[in-house]
Amino acid sequence: MKREKDQKRRRKPITESSLRNAALRYLEQYASGSENLRRVLLRRVAKARMQNDDADANDDTDADRAPDAEAWIDTIIERFQCTGVLDDAAFAEAQVQTLHRRGVSAKGARYRLSAKGVGSDDIDAALGSLESLGENDKSAACNYARRRRIGPWRRANRKDNRDRDLAALGRQGFTYQIARLVIDSPDVGSLEIDEDQT
């Protein structure tokens, strides 16, 4: 009985201030780019419309506001960009650095950021700033290998697990040459010496 009442309960109508508050709550919890925030807010509006349609098909109070929601979202995002709350370039740079530390290749970082709606210019700039710091796919592969304890970080059975370790780096988007360089390295020290020389 209670479940039926909960299902029939209407959500509060979507207003510009409720969307702005939802956007601020989302940004307090998660780093986001403009396009990703737009997607989040659009999903929220779509969900509210579906629930209100299910609750009462004859009531069109929200149907009158339906065209305004997208305009409100555009206004909110534009305002956040002007005030600096949303900065796609800074978001891309922070994400690229985080992904690099986790051991994600440049190719993998590009894919993940483009899936989040970050523009290719911002992605290129972020990857370029990472390379200007001397970081490259080889150091990211070392980060991944260190984190997963594969290759020279593996304590036992290195030769038996060589193909598995190469495949793990391949799945992360690293080229065969980089994967082989990291996995076939005799020890961790030689990798760090190689990194200093490049």
Image: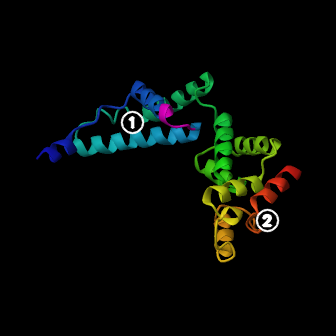
Q: Regarding mark 1 in the picture, which secondary structure is present there?
A: helix
Question: Residue 79: percent from the left, percent from the top?
Answer: 56, 24
**Left or right placement of residue 55 versus residue 40 in this view:** left
Q: Residue at x 49, y 31 (%)?
A: 28
| CB atoms of marks 2 and 1 within 8 Å | no
Is 150 covered by the magenta stretch? Answer: no
Residue type beneath disc 2: Leu
Residue 14 at x, y percent in the picture? 36, 31
Query: Which comes before the other along the chain, label 2 or label 1?
Result: 1
- Any mark on residue 181, and which? 2
Residue at screen point 23% across, 42% down:
55
Residue 138 coordinates in the image, percent (x, y): 77, 56
Residue stretch rendered in magenta on the structure: 27-32
* Mark 1 neighbour class, 10 Å CA radius: few under 14, some 14 to 19, many 20 or more: some
Direction top: furthest residue: 83
Cα separation, mark 2 vs mark 1, equals: 56 Å
Towards the viewer: 91 or 190: 190
Quadrant assignment, res 87? top right
Q: Is residue 57 visible?
A: no
Quarter assignment of residue 59: top left
Residue projecting furthest to the left: 1
Question: What number is the disc on residue 147?
Answer: none
Nearer the observer, 49 or 163: 163
Label 2: how many Cα within 10 Å (few below 14, some 14–19, many 20+): some
Asked if residue 26 is positioned above or below residue 141 in the image, the reply reads: above
Which residue of the protein is positioned furthest toward the bottom in this rendering?
A: 160
* Residue that numbered label 1 is attached to: 66
Q: Is residue 97 left or right of residue 64?
A: right
